[in-house]
């Protein structure tokens, strides 16, 4: 059944996403430690904007808004870990 196949694809993608997000969050913690050593602020609006524009450019226009909403949540959680 096609629905089952599509759901299986989503499960595989979700696993990959979870592992990649975990890896990203670990690196964000390290970045937070480095920022503290260098006495730099946690929030860098310019860096976030650059990442949003760069990453959104990889997607079809119809998916960019949804992706940016997800990315915004990832940024929020990343900043929490850096504190």
Image (cartoon, rainbow, N blue to C red):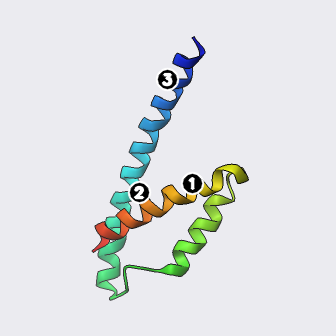
- In the rendering, which numbered label is found on residue 51? none
On the picture, is 24 further left or further right than 29? Answer: right
Label 2: element kind: helix
Of the 4 image quadrants, the one containing the N terminus is: top right
Dot 3 or dot 2: first in sequence order is 3
Q: Position of residue 19 (x, y in %)?
A: 39, 44
Of the 4 image quadrants, the one containing the C terminus is: bottom left
Mark in the foreground, 3 or 2: 3
Label 1: element kind: helix
Q: Which residue is mark 2?
A: 24
**Residue furthest out toward the top:** 1
**Residue at (41%, 79%) from the top-left corner?**
43
**In the figure, residue 38 lies in which quadrant?**
bottom left
Q: Position of residue 82 (x, y in %)?
A: 31, 71
**Residue at (64%, 59%) from the top-left corner?**
56
How far apart in space, not on screen, are marks 1 and 3 (Cα)? 21 Å
Q: Is residue 29 above or below residue 8?
A: below
**Residue furthest out toward the right:** 61
**Residue at (37%, 86%) from the top-left corner?**
40
Q: Which residue is mark 3?
A: 8
Q: Which residue is mark 1?
A: 67
**In the figure, residue 11 lies in which quadrant?**
top left
Q: Position of residue 18 (x, y in %)?
A: 40, 43
Label 1 with label 3: CB-CB less than 8 Å? no
Disc 2 crowd, CA 10 A, few/some/many (<14, 14-19, 20+): some
């Amino acid at each position: 059944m096609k629905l089952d196949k599509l759901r299986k694809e989503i499960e595989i993608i979700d696993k990959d996403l979870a592992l990649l997000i975990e890896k990203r969050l670990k690196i964000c913690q390290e970045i937070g430690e480095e920022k503290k050593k260098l006495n730099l602020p946690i929030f860098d609006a310019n860096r976030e904007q650059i990442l949003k524009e760069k990453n959104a450019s990889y997607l079809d226009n119809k998916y960019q808004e949804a992706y940016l909403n997800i990315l915004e949540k990832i940024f929020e959680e990343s900043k929490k870990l850096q504190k």
